[in-house]
């Protein structure tokens, strides 16, 4: 039946006339995927591509893990649905597993998407302060260039102007500060000084807004879709100290960085911090089924146990959050992680990826290469001295060439004007070393083609001498 429908010649037409694609209609889909195995996806014409973006940064255990499908089937036969206003076994087991991954003591609220997980975090943060008699704390601070989701609250926290513009005014009470940008903003400072400087941005915002009005600060450990912006060492620790000092909750958005993407279970674990709230999605099921979670420190949860009136409880429910089949899929997904030791693999193969990418510095349009674990960004510039960003058309052309040659590379979304110039790589964590080589050599050839447009004769000579 599936093939009957999918092999029909008119399916792409039907798609065009009846599906409103993400980011559409101007970027409507001309890429229809039929099946996928391991790190490869195959389109309707039978062409196969190495997916160096794991779908949307999420298929961490790789495509076609039949074990997950089997567990989902078994769960669906046994208990296809029950709301989590009551309880069921897969959710209980998964919450226990997540606590072991978090190395902490958290109460887990399940939803369906990363956006919702963040919405829940904001509601809990505001209500927590109210329950403690500090109802004036409602503001949420976040960072420019960070992404926290598409729903109106999560979008309000998002610091990416172009994604918000047509939907404003958004929710009140969301404040933005500058993110760390080691490549463009840290000049003249040591890593330590820059970490202090960036953390001070947060302290200033809290003080200037009035600490008694601030509920929480939300951040991704590494800004991912906003351009792969790495924090300077110790930044997270300084942030945690400031949050504690002013009674502000620290929410870490691990929607992309979680589940081994950065070479640790969670991105925050690169530093000695224990966030108040951790949100997660994508890698939780490796994209096999929708599921997200908001992990809340036990002492915050305990505040809700007083329950002295009808508005003291968390007034939040969603029909599908913590769906038993999604939880069963997540459990099997995490079992595969543990058996294949995917977190260590991400760390080791990520080091190899970054090392191989360094070769791209021979092209003068490569301004910066950064990353951690199996996640990397390549910032492209017209000129290394001025750091003028490469035009979006050229960035796009590199992606198009790579795709023609069978490798799917990503780039930072349309986020802030003029800075859509970062290529991104975040493959399934099961990727092999040779496949990493394949990504890098394809990228090198594509970048070379675009770089040649910008190279003066003298630069070409320098480049040729370096290369040969
Ligand atoms: C860091 C981050 N937070 C939140 C979200 C929102 O997740 P979802 O698309 O599942 O709503 C995303 C999605 O890409 C994300 O990258």
Image (tube, helix red, strand yellow):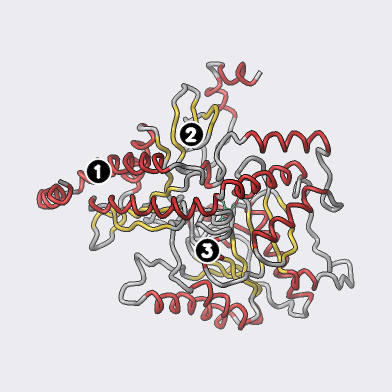
The residue located at (47%, 48%) in the rendering is: 426
Mark 2 against mark 3, which lies toward the viewer?
A: 2
Neighbours of disc 1 within 10 Å: few (<14), some (14-19), many (20+): some
Q: Is residue 122 above or below residue 44?
A: below
Distance between mark 2 and mark 1 Cα atoms: 25 Å
Secondary structure state at the residue bearing disc 2: strand
Q: Residue reaching furthest front? A: 339
**First in sequence: mark 2 vs mark 3:** 2
Secondary structure state at the residue bearing disc 3: loop
Q: Position of residue 62 (x, y in %)?
A: 55, 40
The residue located at (69%, 42%) in the rendering is: 329
Residue under numbered circle 3: 221
Q: Position of residue 207 (x, y in %)?
A: 56, 83
Q: Is residue 325 left or right of residue 178?
A: right
Q: Nearer the viewer, residue 174 or 252?
A: 252
Distance between mark 2 and mark 3 Cα atoms: 28 Å
Q: What is the number of the mark on residue 40? A: 2
Neighbours of disc 2 within 10 Å: few (<14), some (14-19), many (20+): many
The residue located at (29%, 57%) in the rendering is: 367
Secondary structure state at the residue bearing disc 1: helix
Label 3 within 8 A of ligand 1 by Cβ = no
Q: Quadrant of residue 214?
A: bottom right
Residue under numbered circle 1: 448
Q: Position of residue 398 (x, y in %)?
A: 33, 41
Asked if labels 1 and 2 touch by Cβ distance under 8 angstroms, the answer is no
Q: Position of residue 359 (x, y in %)?
A: 28, 51
Distance between mark 3 and mark 1 Cα atoms: 32 Å
Q: Is residue 415 left or right of residue 330?
A: left
Mark 2 against mark 1, which lies toward the viewer?
A: 2
Q: Nearer the viewer, residue 83 or 318?
A: 83
Q: Nearer the viewer, residue 323 or 144?
A: 323
Neighbours of disc 3 within 10 Å: few (<14), some (14-19), many (20+): many
């Amino acid at each position: 039946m599936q093939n009957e429908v999918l092999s029909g010649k008119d399916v792409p037409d039907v798609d065009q006339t009846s599906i409103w694609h993400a980011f559409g209609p101007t970027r409507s889909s001309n890429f229809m995927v039929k099946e996928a195995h391991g790190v490869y996806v195959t389109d309707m014409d039978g062409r196969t591509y190495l997916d160096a973006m794991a779908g949307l940064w999420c298929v961490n255990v790789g495509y076609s893990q039949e074990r997950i499908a089997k567990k989902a089937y078994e769960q669906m036969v046994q208990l296809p649905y029950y709301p989590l206003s009551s309880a069921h076994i897969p959710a209980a087991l998964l919450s226990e597993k997540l606590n072991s991954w978090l190395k902490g003591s958290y109460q887990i609220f399940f939803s369906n998407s990363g956006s919702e997980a963040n919405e829940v975090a904001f509601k809990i943060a505001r209500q927590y302060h109210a329950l403690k008699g500090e109802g004036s704390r409602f503001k949420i601070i976040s960072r420019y260039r960070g992404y926290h989701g598409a729903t109106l609250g999560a979008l309000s926290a998002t610091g990416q102007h172009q994604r918000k513009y047509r939907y404003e005014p958004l929710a009140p009470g969301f404040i933005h500060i500058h993110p760390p940008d080691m490549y463009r903003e840290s000049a003249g400072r040591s890593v330590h000084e820059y970490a202090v400087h960036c953390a001070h941005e947060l302290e200033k915002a809290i003080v200037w807004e009035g600490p008694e009005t601030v509920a929480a600060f939300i951040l991704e450990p590494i800004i991912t879709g906003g351009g792969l912006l790495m924090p300077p060492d110790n930044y997270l620790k300084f942030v945690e100290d400031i949050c504690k000092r002013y009674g502000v909750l620290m929410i870490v958005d691990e929607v992309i960085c979680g589940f081994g993407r950065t070479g640790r279970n969670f991105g925050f674990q690169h530093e000695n911090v224990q966030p108040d709230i951790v949100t997660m999605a994508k890698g939780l099921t490796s994209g096999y089924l929708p599921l997200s979670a908001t992990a809340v420190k036990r002492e915050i949860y305990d505040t809700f146990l007083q329950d002295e009136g009808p508005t003291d409880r968390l007034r939040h429910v969603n029909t599908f959050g913590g769906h038993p089949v999604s939880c069963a899929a997540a459990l099997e997904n995490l079992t595969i992680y543990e058996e294949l030791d995917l977190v260590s693999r991400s760390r080791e193969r990520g080091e190899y990826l970054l090392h191989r990418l360094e070769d791209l510095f021979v092209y003068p349009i490569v301004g910066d290469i950064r990353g951690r674990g199996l996640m990397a960004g390549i910032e492209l510039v017209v000129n290394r001295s001025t750091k003028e960003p490469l035009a979006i058309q050229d960035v796009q052309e590199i992606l198009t060439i790579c795709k023609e040659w069978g490798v799917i590379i990503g780039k930072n979304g349309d986020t802030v004007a003029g800075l859509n110039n970062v290529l991104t790589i975040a493959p399934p964590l099961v990727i092999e070393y040779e496949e990493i080589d394949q990504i890098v050599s394809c990228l090198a050839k594509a970048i070379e083609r675009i770089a040649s447009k910008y190279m003066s004769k003298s630069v070409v000579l320098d480049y040729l001498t370096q290369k040969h």
